[in-house]
Image: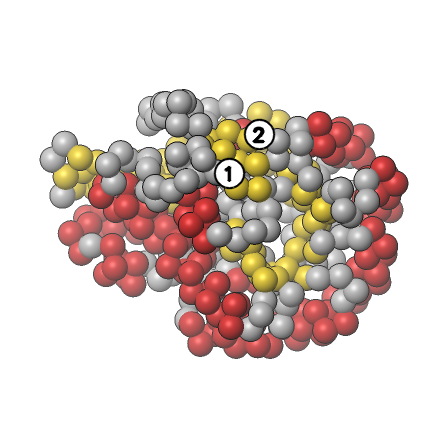
C-alpha cells in the first residue's frame, strides 16, 4: 500500500466575503492511497487562519502520514489528533479505497438518487445591493432556508436586508439563519441579538469570537434567539473538554464541520455529547472541493437529521471537479447519471 499527497488551489468564481476578509482562492490537499490497481482519495480541507492545523509543519505532517500509511486509519487518526483536516482526509481515503468505486463511500437512498438532503442557501457578505441580489437568486432557486453572513457591512444595512425579506416572506415560508463569524464584541452582542430577534430568525452562529466561554455562556443564557456554536468547537480534542465546553456554555445548537473537528469520528463524538444534553446540531461543509463535499454529504445523509444542512458549496469555484452532486429546489441531490471527472 502506497500513499501520496498533493496541493490544489480552488479559485472562486466571485470573491466571497466573510468577517475575516475576502476570499479569492482556497487551498486544499488530496491524499491518494493505492493498493495494486485499487485507489482511494481523501481531501484535507484546511482553512487558513481558521483551522487549528494551520501550522508551518502542515505539509510535513502530510508527508509523514503518507510515509506511515501502513499504520491504518484508526492508529493514524490517533496520531493526527492535532491535525483534524488530515484525520478527515485519511478517513475518507481509506473508505474510498475499500468502496466499489472511489466516490461511493456511504451507499444509500441518497446516492441512488431516491432521496435528497435539504440545505440552506448561503448569502455571502458584500454591499447591500450584492446581498439583496443573492437573496433573490436563492429564493428563485427554490430555497426555503437562507443563511446570511453578517458582521462585515453596516449593521443597520444588514437589518434592512432582513426586514426586506421578512416583509415579503414570513418564518413559515422562509427560515432565516445568520452567521456572525464572531464579529460582535461581548459588550454589544446582546443588544444586537435583540435587534435581530425581531425578524424571526432560526438562529445565529458564533455571535462573538471563540475562546470567551463565560461571555458566550452568559449570552446563551439571556439570548432572545437561539445561538449555534461553530468556531468554538475548533481545537477541542479531548472528550472531557468537549463535555465541559457544552456544559459551561449550554448553547441551543452546535454546527459541525468535519474538516475542522476530526472527520467522521470527531463529528460523531460531538453529536453524542450534544444529544445527551438536548443540544441540536447540523453539519456544514467548509469550502471543500466536490470530493470532500461528496464525502460529507453521503455521511450526513446517514445521520438522518431533519434540519437543513450547510452543504452545497461546490458551485463556488471555476476549477471544481464535475460530480453527481447537484442543487435542485433548495436540496442537494446525487444524480448518478452524471459521471465524476477528477483530474489532479
Q: Which part of the image, by quadrant, shows the C terminus?
A: top left
Whether residue 152 appears in this view of the structure is: no
**Residue in view at x 44 percent, y 33 percent:** 113
Picture coordinates of residue 152 (x, y %)? 73, 45
Whole-angstrom CA distance, mark 1 to mark 2, is: 9 Å
Quarter where residue 173 is shown: top right
Crowding near the residue tagged with mark 1, few <14, some 14–19, many ≥20 C-alpha atoms within 10 Å: some
Q: Of residues 15 and 340, which is closer to you in this image? A: 340
Proximity of marks 1 and 2: CB atoms separated by less than 8 Å: yes
Question: How are the colours assigned in the image?
Answer: secondary structure
Which residue is labeled 2 in the image? Answer: 328
Picture coordinates of residue 107 (x, y %)? 34, 41
Q: Of residues 293 and 90, which is closer to you in this image? A: 293
**Residue in view at x 40 percent, y 36 percent:** 111
Which residue is labeled 1 in the image? Answer: 116
- Number of on-image labels: 2
Quarter where residue 169 is shown: top right
- Left or right of residue 334, residue 142 in this image: right
Picture coordinates of residue 77 (x, y %)? 30, 58
Q: Which part of the image, by quadrant, shows the N terminus?
A: top left
- Left or right of residue 27, residue 315 in this image: right
Picture coordinates of residue 276 (x, y %)? 51, 72
Amino acid at each position: 500500500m502506497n500513499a501520496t499527497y498533493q496541493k490544489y488551489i480552488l479559485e472562486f468564481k466571485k470573491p466571497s466575503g466573510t468577517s475575516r476578509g475576502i476570499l479569492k482562492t482556497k487551498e486544499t490537499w488530496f491524499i491518494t492511497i493505492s493498493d495494486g490497481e485499487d485507489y482511494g482519495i481523501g481531501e484535507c480541507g484546511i482553512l487558513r487562519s481558521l483551522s487549528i492545523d494551520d501550522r508551518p509543519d502542515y505539509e510535513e505532517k502530510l508527508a509523514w502520514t503518507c510515509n506511515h500509511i501502513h499504520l491504518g486509519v484508526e492508529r493514524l487518526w490517533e496520531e493526527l489528533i492535532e491535525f483534524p483536516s488530515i484525520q478527515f482526509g485519511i478517513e475518507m481515503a481509506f473508505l474510498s479505497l475499500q468502496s466499489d468505486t472511489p466516490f461511493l463511500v456511504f451507499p444509500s437512498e441518497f446516492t441512488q438518487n431516491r432521496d435528497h438532503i435539504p440545505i440552506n442557501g448561503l448569502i455571502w457578505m458584500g454591499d447591500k445591493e450584492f446581498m439583496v441580489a443573492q437573496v433573490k437568486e436563492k429564493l428563485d432557486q427554490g430555497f426555503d432556508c437562507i443563511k446570511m453572513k453578517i458582521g462585515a457591512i453596516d449593521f443597520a444595512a444588514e437589518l434592512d436586508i432582513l426586514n426586506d425579506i421578512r416583509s415579503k416572506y414570513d418564518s413559515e415560508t422562509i427560515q432565516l439563519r445568520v452567521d456572525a463569524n464572531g464579529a460582535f464584541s461581548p459588550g454589544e452582542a446582546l443588544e444586537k441579538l435583540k435587534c435581530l430577534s425581531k425578524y424571526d430568525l432560526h438562529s445565529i452562529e458564533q455571535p462573538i469570537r471563540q475562546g470567551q466561554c463565560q461571555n458566550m455562556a452568559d449570552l446563551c443564557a439571556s439570548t432572545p434567539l437561539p445561538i449555534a456554536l461553530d468556531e468554538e468547537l475548533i481545537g477541542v480534542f479531548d472528550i472531557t473538554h468537549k463535555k465541559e465546553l457544552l456544559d459551561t456554555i449550554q448553547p441551543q445548537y452546535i454546527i459541525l464541520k468535519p474538516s475542522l473537528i476530526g472527520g467522521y469520528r470527531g463529528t460523531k463524538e460531538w453529536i453524542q455529547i450534544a444529544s445527551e444534553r438536548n443540544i441540536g446540531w447540523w453539519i456544514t461543509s467548509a469550502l471543500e472541493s466536490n470530493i470532500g463535499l461528496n464525502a460529507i454529504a453521503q455521511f450526513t445523509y446517514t445521520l438522518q437529521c431533519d434540519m437543513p444542512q450547510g452543504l452545497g458549496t461546490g458551485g463556488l469555484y471555476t476549477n471544481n471537479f464535475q460530480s453527481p452532486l447537484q442543487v435542485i429546489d433548495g436540496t442537494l441531490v446525487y444524480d448518478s447519471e452524471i459521471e465524476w471527472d477528477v483530474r489532479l
